[in-house]
Image (cartoon, rainbow, N blue to C red):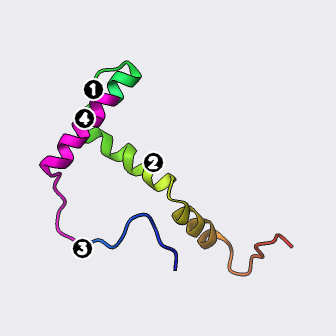
Amino acid sequence: MTKLKLGPIADEKPVKITAALHRDLVAYAEILARESGQTAADPVRLIVPMVERFIATDRRFAKRERREKLPPNHSRTGI
C-alpha cells in the first residue's frame, strides 16, 4: 500500500480554521506579499493553492495516480 504525505482523517465533522492556523496563514500571506511585491491576500485564499501544491508534490500520490490510470493489461516496460 502506498503511504501518502497525509495520514488518516479522524472524523467527518465540518472543518473550521483554528486561530493558530489563521495566524499562520496571515503570516504566510504577509511574507508572500513582501516577496512578490504585492499586497497581502486574504489568508483564506491561500488554502486552495497550498492544497494544490501539496498534492502536486506528493510523489506517492502521483505514482499511485499513474499506476491506476494504466489500462488493465498494460505493460509497464512498454513492450
Can you tell which mark lies on residue 53? 2
Say what secondary structure mark 1 lies in: loop
Outermost residue on the left side: it is 19
For disc 3, the neighbor class at 10 Å (few under 14, some 14 to 19, many from 20) is: few
Q: Position of residue 66 (x, y in %)?
A: 62, 66
Q: Position of residue 55 (x, y in %)?
A: 46, 56
Image quarter where the C terminus lies is bottom right
Can you tell which mark lies on residue 67? none
Q: Which residue is under mark 4?
A: 27
Q: Which residues are magenta?
A: 11-31
Horizontally, residue 46 falls left or right of residue 21, namely right
* Disc nearer the start of the sequence (1/4): 4
Which mark is nearer the camera, 3 or 4? 4
Work out whether 33 lies above or below 78: above
Which mark is nearer the camera, 2 or 4? 4
Residue type beneath disc 3: Ala
Specify whether residue 64 is painted magenta.
no
* Disc nearer the start of the sequence (1/2): 1
* Disc nearer the start of the sequence (1/3): 3
